[in-house]
Amino acid sequence: MNELSPQKLTAKDFASDQEVRWCPGCGDYAILKSVQKTLADIEADPANTVFVSGIGCSSRFPYYMATYGFHTIHGRAPAFATGIKLANPKLDVWMVTGDGDGLSIGGNHLLHVLRRNVDLQILLFNNEIYGLTKGQYSPTSRPGTRSPSSPSGSIERNLNPCAFALAAGARFVARTVDTDQKHMPEILKRAHGHRGASFVEIYQNCIVFNDGVFANFTDKKSAPERQLRAEHGHRLTFGASNEKGLRLDREKVAIEVVTIGENGITEDDILMHDETDPVLAHLLATLDGPDMPVVVGVIFNNPAETYDAGVTQQVEKARAAKPNADMKELLFAGSTWTVD
């Protein structure tokens, strides 16, 4: 590197001077480190990067990034992020939200930013609980969850964030785990490289109010048997020796777990992951049950024109048609009234 070359930034260059204040052991620390590493790896420009958040533990995020940032209001981060991207399409916009902020009061806003396909990265921290307001059950909390707002156990069916994103029309949907510092940056880079709304669900442990809720598929001992890493063009296998796999039951149009080598099952019987297939994406996102693995990785990736690109084209076309348009003339066009 010569003297005229810009100095390559490191993860530390994306860390602000603010004291990071989450509970000791919170999964948010790991996510923060992973995001900072990712930005350094992709050689992001801090002056061109914006983090937008709503309300909740995850929404402290902008304070800890040495970039531009907006800590906005409950559930409305998608609206702010959309406005920022439309005002300056050259900005690299990241949106941080939680399962409560994004899927409860903010569900309507999240739905539309995905449907419109605004070009930004959406990171949803899912700890299946309201952490900031002291442990009430959230939209993703599982049935039976005991909390201050459900002392006898939640009787609601939990919402699946990735299934929600797919149903809203998201063109990029992925999952990762807070403590997996090798996998998460890979997923974040894929999300950043996608043009359009990239939705990434991050399983994040709340050590105070919901500790260990994901342990059955995130702990080192249990992960091989309960976690499946989907990769485009690869067989959907898992297990300590990749001896298990997913096969499509065509009669039931459902996925079943089979073991290679048993009952005549061969590797050719195992589904190949095609991240452009919306039907397969839905099946993988909604796998549930003690015998089913939790799928992480890029579940769906099928780009389409972005909302901000479409709006920019409309603006440019309008400017070309009327290069000397006058705003005052527009405001006073048509019928006007004078009020005494």
Image (cartoon, rainbow, N blue to C red):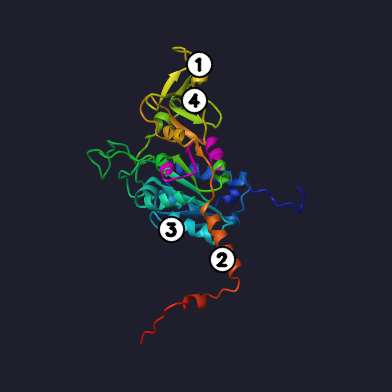
Q: Which residue, given by chain and number where applicable, does mark 3 sit on?
A: 72
Check residue 183 for magenta coloring: yes
- Residue 18 visible: no
Residue 319 relative to residue 166: left or right: right
Find residue 48 and report its image quarter: bottom right
First in residue order: circle 2 vs circle 3: 3
**In the drawing, what numbered circle is on residue 266?**
1
The location of residue 36, given as percent across then percent down, is 56, 46
User: In the rendered structure, which segment of residues is drawn in magenta?
Assistant: 165-188
Q: Which residue, given by chain and number where applicable, does mark 2 sit on?
A: 318
First in residue order: circle 4 vs circle 3: 3
- Residue 109 visible: yes
Find residue 189 and report its image quarter: top right
Residue type at mark 2: give it.
Ala
Q: Which residue, given by chain and number where applicable, does mark 4 sit on?
A: 271
Query: Which residue lies at the image location 43% right of the left edge and 26% below the top edge?
Result: 226
The location of residue 265, given as percent across then percent down, is 47, 15
Q: Are marks 2 and 3 in contact (CB under 8 Å)?
A: no
State the separation of the CA atoms marked 1 and 3.
52 Å
Q: Is residue 289 above or below residue 102?
A: above
